[in-house]
Amino acid sequence: MAQIGFLGLGTMGSGMVRNLLQAGHAVTVFNRSPERAEEVVGLGARLASSAAEAAQGADFLMYCFADDRAVEEVVLADGGVAEHVEPSTRVIDLSTISVGTALREHEVYETRGVRFLDAPVFGSRGEAAGGGLWVVVGGAEEDVEAARPVLEPISATLHHMGAKGSGARMKLVGNLLVASQLQALGDALTLARKSGLDLDAVLGVLDVADFRTPIYAGVGRRVLEGDYSPDFALKLLLKDLRLIAGQAQEVGIELPTLATTTDLAEAGVDQGWGEENASAVIKVLAERAQVDLTR
């Protein structure tokens, strides 16, 4: 079993650490808010006093942060953990960040002879807790294979997308689809309500039609219950939409649905719903149409 250093114990990170421990790995954790480490320490993880200490002697250093700024501050800044990682340690970044930051990480680690993978994950609270995330990886094939023993316990599937930065690129592609589905679901439910349809009956059709998705089924019913408790916060969706916009600009294309979804997410955050689930974009649509989508 591997010695793992793990940084970042938010909703996603804590679930991943639990599954790594259950797989028999020895895990040393660090979080800038140490109280978040209490649960996994109770399950057998060791708490380090710094990120550098968590990385010391590790076979793998894994981390999952909320945004680029956290990666910059903890990993890439002067004195950051990248300067303390030993060449024998393999590093895996599970965060959703810009392609540019992921490529900078590759460059920094390469100069130190450290093997690195950008490996963001699809899924939220439930998938992280159940070891059912979908991991998309950028980096060398040999490094992906070497990392399987620590990636498989946290994932349902593992996808090598290509060379460095490819995992980060795929994560933005996937999150564009997530955001578009949330917007489409909100539009559809709003139109259905305005048209006098029973929303439970509408969701019954969405369950079986050829355009069905887990997002329509799961989020749709939570909307009818008025449940916007966070699995993936709206403020994080907005962060990802801005990353997608930056990537689209870099490759020189327009994404018409992105502007609309970003407007909805910005409006929801301005309303004070940033800590609610990303599906709060549907609340914005319903409010603008002056409809109540709850049962």
Image (tube, rainbow, N blue to C red):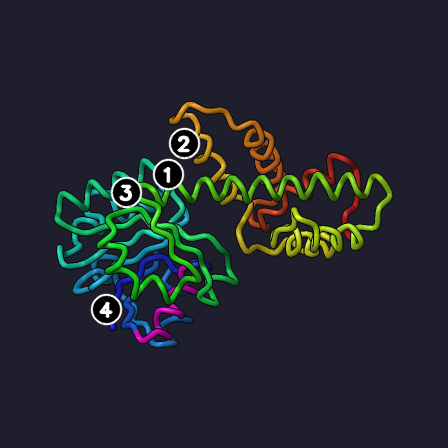
Q: Is residue 37 left or right of residue 187?
A: left
> What segment is highlighted magenta in the picture?
13-24
Q: Which amino acid does label 4 sit on?
A: Gln
Mark pair 2, 3: CA separation: 17 Å
Residue matched to label 2: 247
Where's residue 88, x and y in %? 14, 59
Helix, strand or loop at mark 2 = helix
Q: Tell me the residue at 56%/41% (across/down).
A: 179
Where's residue 65, x and y in %? 38, 51
Give the prevailing secondary structure in the magenta stretch. Answer: helix
Question: In the picture, which quadrant includes the N terminus?
Answer: bottom left
Residue matched to label 1: 98
Q: Tell me the residue at 17%/49% (across/down).
A: 83
Q: Nearer the viewer, mark 1 or mark 3?
A: 3
Q: What residue type is labelled 1?
A: Ser
Q: What residue type is labelled 2?
A: Gln
Question: Which disc number belongs to residue 3?
Answer: 4
Q: Tell me the residue at 37%/38% (across/down).
A: 98
Residue matched to label 3: 163
Is residue 130 depicted above or below 183 in this figure? below
Where's residue 145, x and y in %? 26, 58
- Extreme front residue here? 210
Q: Which amino acid does label 3 sit on?
A: Ala
